[in-house]
């Protein structure tokens, strides 16, 4: 979401005559687009602000701004305790040009008003990806779930969906510009819903509309919610070859007690039923997840429930964290953060070790298979190419014939827990 928002910000400022630079020593305006979901992300930003101020001290007229979720959540602290000229929340990007014009040495500017309508649907983002292969399209903003640990509803506001016609038009535009893949973005894409006098479009219908614009354009989406992912969406994914067979389905915990305390609105059994449905319709579908270790009053039995669910599902990959309390959330107000840090870290390390085993087992099952891969560019080592299969697994292979943006068939000949080692098929 932050990448998508950054592209919107660049588009707004470009229209006003600003030029983008990646050299901080050239920038007259230095802004950080921030996330508040994890505490460590916020802590990094405090350090960045100090770095930005070095530029301000060495060059006259430099403006420093903080935009995004952290700006929304910590607006007063940003202005009171750090030298920041601009604070702008996720729904106020259209006002950035005016805010910048109004800044004075003794007059910082702030706009953190949340909106019930803003979707930036009419703005064509300035793409900032390096390879020109994959583009992000934001289909909705905000979230209505109010999970007890999460700050998103407070920093991004209530859910509102974009007009589907603007989404389809943007998908057509990025394909025309040479992109081969789009990722539809939302805090909970499964709750996307657009209703007008002429249309009633849910997420399954939207994905179908985008997929049918061009059979050569790959479609991905993120993030799904276990309580909302529908049979219709799963069946739509199976129907169209250009919709990638991968679902990121955050579980957070395998314990019903923790899920209830997290306000996740599904049970362990309900989650496993959705996984069973996905695999009955798409046996080859990749599954990834999010897991939180050490949530409020989590017991060893709760932790074991999470480990056993991970084993039962056999996730391909996971984003794994230990719980960090976020001020202003329901959990911070209602539940004590009473699991000791050393216990959180130990449980997280156990989860990470298990997922590495599961990832390796999953990848080993793919040895000998042939996948169509969209080439993203050189691998990290630089002597091979890399790209993702439909199931979102990273493939690395030697190839002197193709370039980024090409589709190639590769055969898996080996693997690590993170990568499929391939050769041209």
Image (cartoon, rainbow, N blue to C red):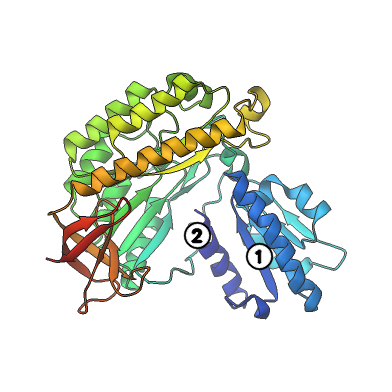
Looking at the image, which residue is at 68% across and 61% down? 48
Residue bearing the label numbered 1: 31
Whole-percent x and y of residue 107? 84, 62
Q: Secondary structure under badge 1? A: strand
* Residue 115 in sight in this render: no
Q: Tell which residue pokes out farthest to the right in this image.
A: 106
Residue 110 falls in image quadrant: bottom right
Q: Nearer the viewer, residue 162 or 248?
A: 248
Residue bearing the label numbered 2: 3
Q: Is residue 138 above or below residue 422?
A: above
Whole-percent x and y of residue 161? 46, 45
Residue 39 falls in image quadrant: top right
Whole-percent x and y of residue 60? 80, 78
Judge from the rendering whether residue 209 lies leftward or rightward of residue 107; answer left or right.
left
Looking at the image, which residue is at 67% across and 79% down? 25
Q: Is residue 14 above or below residue 284?
A: below
Label 1 crowd (10 A; few <14 / some 14-19 / many >=20): many
Whichever of labels 1 and 2 marks the residue nearer the N terminus, that label is 2
Q: Is residue 218 above or below residue 143?
A: below
Q: Secondary structure under badge 2? A: helix
Q: Quadrant of the C terminus?
A: bottom left
Q: Nearer the viewer, residue 323 or 238?
A: 323
Q: Nearer the viewer, residue 65 or 275?
A: 275
Judge from the rendering whether residue 130 lies leftward or rightward of residue 142; answer left or right.
left
């Amino acid at each position: 979401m932050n990448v998508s928002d950054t592209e919107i910000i660049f588009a707004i400022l470009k229209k006003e005559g600003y030029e983008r630079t990646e050299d901080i020593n050239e920038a007259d305006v230095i802004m950080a687009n921030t996330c508040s979901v994890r505490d460590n992300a916020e802590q990094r930003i405090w350090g960045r602000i100090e770095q930005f101020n070095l530029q301000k001290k060495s060059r006259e007229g430099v403006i420093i701004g903080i935009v995004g979720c952290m700006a929304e959540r910590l607006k007063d602290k940003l202005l009171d305790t750090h030298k920041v000229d601009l604070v702008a929340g996720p729904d106020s990007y259209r006002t950035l040009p005016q805010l910048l014009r109004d800044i004075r040495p003794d007059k910082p500017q702030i706009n953190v008003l949340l909106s019930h309508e803003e979707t930036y649907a009419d703005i064509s983002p300035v793409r900032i990806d390096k390879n020109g292969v994959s583009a992000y399209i934001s289909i909705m903003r905000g979230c209505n779930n109010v999970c007890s640990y999460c700050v998103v509803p407070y920093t991004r506001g209530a859910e509102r969906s974009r007009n589907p016609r603007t989404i389809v038009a943007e998908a057509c535009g990025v394909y025309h510009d040479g992109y081969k893949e789009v990722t539809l973005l939302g805090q909970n894409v499964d709750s996307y819903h657009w209703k007008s006098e002429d249309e009633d479009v849910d997420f399954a219908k939207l994905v179908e509309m985008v997929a049918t614009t061009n059979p050569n354009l790959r479609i991905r989406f993120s993030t799904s919610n276990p309580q909302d992912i529908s049979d219709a969406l799963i069946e739509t994914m199976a129907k169209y070859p250009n919709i990638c067979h991968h679902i990121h389905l955050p579980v957070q915990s395998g314990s019903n007690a923790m899920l209830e305390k997290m306000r996740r609105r599904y049970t362990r059994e309900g989650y496993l039923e959705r996984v069973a449905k996905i695999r009955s319709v798409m046996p080859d579908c990749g599954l990834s997840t999010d897991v939180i270790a050490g949530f409020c009053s989590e017991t060893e039995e709760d932790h074991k429930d999470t480990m056993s669910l991970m084993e039962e599902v056999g996730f391909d990959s996971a984003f794994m964290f230990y719980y960090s309390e976020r001020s202003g959330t329901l959990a911070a107000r209602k539940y004590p953060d009473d699991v000791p840090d050393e216990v959180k870290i130990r449980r997280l390390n156990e989860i990470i070790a298990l997922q590495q085993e599961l990832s390796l087992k999953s990848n080993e099952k793919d040895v000998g298979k042939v996948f169509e891969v969209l080439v993203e560019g050189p691998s990290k080592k630089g002597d091979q190419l890399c790209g993702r299969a439909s199931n979102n697994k990273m493939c690395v292979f030697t190839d002197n014939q193709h370039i980024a943006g090409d589709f190639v068939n590769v055969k898996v000949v080996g693997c690590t827990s993170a990568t499929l080692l391939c050769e041209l098929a």
